[in-house]
Image (cartoon, grey):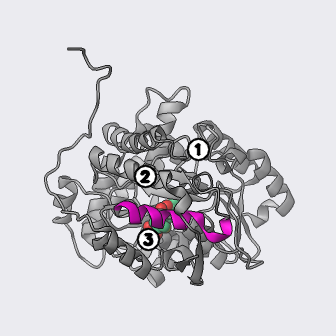
Amino acid sequence: MSLPTRRSWAEPFKIKMVEPVRMTSREDRERAIRQAGYNTFLLRSADVYIDLLTDSGTSAMSDRQWAGMMLGDEAYAGSANFFHLEEAILRYYGYKYIIPTHQGRGAEHLISKILIRPGHVIPGNMYFTTTRLHQELAGGRFVDVIIREAHDPASTHPFKGNFDLEKLEDLIRKVGEKNIPYVSLATSVNMAGGQPISMANLRGLRELTAKYGIRIIHDATRVAENAYFIQQREPGYASRSTASIIHEICSYTDGATMSAKKDALVNIGGFLALNEPELFEEARNLVVVYEGLHTYGGLAGRDMEAMAIGIAESVEDDHIRARVGQVQYLGEKMMSYDVPIVVPIGGHGVFVDAKRFLPHLTQTVYPAQALAAAVYLDSGVRTMERGIVSAGRDKETGCDHTPELELVRFTVPRRVYTQAHMDVVAESAAFVYAQRDKIRGLRMTYEPRYLRFFQARFEEL
Ligand code: PM9
C-alpha cells in the first residue's frame, strides 16, 4: 500500500446543526427559471439546491455567535452590545469611531452624503454596484483607476486589485484634488473576481493621497480575505498573522464602510468607521435620519453582539485558510474540467468567464445572465451574473456600461457547504460547458431604474 502524496487539511469546525436542501427535477427548474424571468435573484430559495448566489448574509454563525445572540441588550439607547462592537472594531481594524448600519449600503449612503458634492470625482479600484450608485446619487462620478490586468480574466497578476497610481495621479492633476473627496479603496475587489490589493500598492496609494491631502475610504467588506492573500503571496508577510495584516491595511486608510454580512460572518449588519471626529459628528447626525440611533443604526442588540464575535472569528488564521481554501478547491476542480474561469482564483467565489464559455453570444444578449440560468437548469445550483447587466447604465449618457469582464460568480458562503457540494457544483459547470453551443442569449423585458441586476426580467431569444 502506498502512502498518500499529500497531507490534507480540513475545516477548523465540526457541524452541529443541519438544514435540509432539496434537489428538484429539471421540469421544476424550467418552470421556476421562466417564472423568475431568467434572473436568479427572482428564484425562490426553496427551488434552489446549492445556493452560490452570494456570500452576503449567508454564512453559518458559530455556536459562540448564537450564544451571543442570547446576550442581546435590546435597550433603545446605549446597548452593551454596541460597546462590544466598538471594542472589536477598534481592536481588529483600528478605527476610532463607529456608526452601526443595517448593512453595507447604509454606511455607503452616509459617507456619500457627508463627503460628496455635485461635480465631485471619486477614483477607485473598480466599481461596486451599490457603492457607485450612492456616489452618483450624491452627485459624484466614479472613475476606475484599477490596473489594466484586472480587466483581463486570463492575467495571472497576483494583485489584480492594485491601483494604477500613475493613472490616479494624472486624474488628480486633471480634475484637481479639491474635487476628489476621497479615494474609494476596496480590499478583495469583488467585481474583478475577488482579487486582492498588495500592501506595497496600498502604501504607494497612501503616499500619493497624502501628497494631495485626499482621504482614503476603505470598503472593508472582505478585508480578511485580502489579508490572507497578502500573507500567502507578498514578500515579507509569510510569517505575519492575518489579524496583524488587517490592522496594517486599515492603518493606511481614513475610514471604512463595512458590509459585515461577508467577512464578519453575520446574517445582517454593517458599519461606518471613521478616525476624524468632525466626520463622525456628521455621521452621528445623519444616522438618526436614515438608520436609527447612533448606538444601534438599524440593528438589534443581538445582531451587534453576533457581529462583534464574528469579527474576532473572521481574523483567525485557521478560519481564513479554510474559507479561501474551499474557494480555491472549487476553482481548481473547474479548471481540471477546462471550464474557463478568472485567474488567479478569488477569495469569495469562482468567477466563470462567460465570454470564453459562450463565444457565440455577443454581450448585447447577456451571456453571463444566460449562463447563470443554464447552470441553474442543469443542477439547481444558483449563481449570479457579474457583467453587463450588473454594470448598468452610464449616469450621463444613459447608455449601457460594457465591462470587459462578463462573468458568472459562483460565490461560496462561509462555513456552509462541504467539499462534496463543491464537487457537485464543478461537475455541473463541466456538464453545462460540454453543452455550451445550445445556450441561447436573452432579451431584457423589464429594466428597473436602480441596480437593475436585482430585479430585471428576461426571456430567451
Ligand atoms: N455585496 C454581493 O453579493 C450583496 C449585494 S450586491 C449583489 O457581493 C461590497 C464590496 C460588497 C457589497 C455587497 C456591498 C454592499 C458593499 N461592498 O449588501 O449593503 O460586496 O451589505 O453591502 C453583495 P450590503
Labels 2 and 3: the sequence-earlier one:
3
- Highlighted magenta segment, given as a residue range: 363-379
Labels 2 and 1: the sequence-earlier one:
1
Callout in the foreground (2, 1): 2
Disc 1 marks a residue whose amino acid type is: Ile
Name the residue carrying label 1: 197
Rendered image quadrant of residue 121: bottom right
Q: Nearer the viewer, residue 203 or 171?
A: 171
Q: Secondary structure at mark 3?
A: helix
Mark 3 surroundings within 10 Å by alpha-carbon count, few (fewer than 14), some (14 through 19), many (20 or more): many
Residue 238 in magenta stretch: no
Residue at coordinates 19% horizontally, 60% vertically from top-left? 66
Name the residue carrying label 2: 431
Counting from the top left corner in percent of width and height, residue 362 is at 68, 64
Location of residue 402 with respect to 450 vertically, above or below: above
Q: Secondary structure at mark 2?
A: helix
Q: Nearer the viewer, residue 262 or 48?
A: 48
Cα–Cα gap, marks 2 and 1: 34 Å
Name the residue carrying label 3: 40
Counting from the top left corner in percent of width and height, residue 223 is at 47, 49
Disc 2 marks a residue whose amino acid type is: Phe
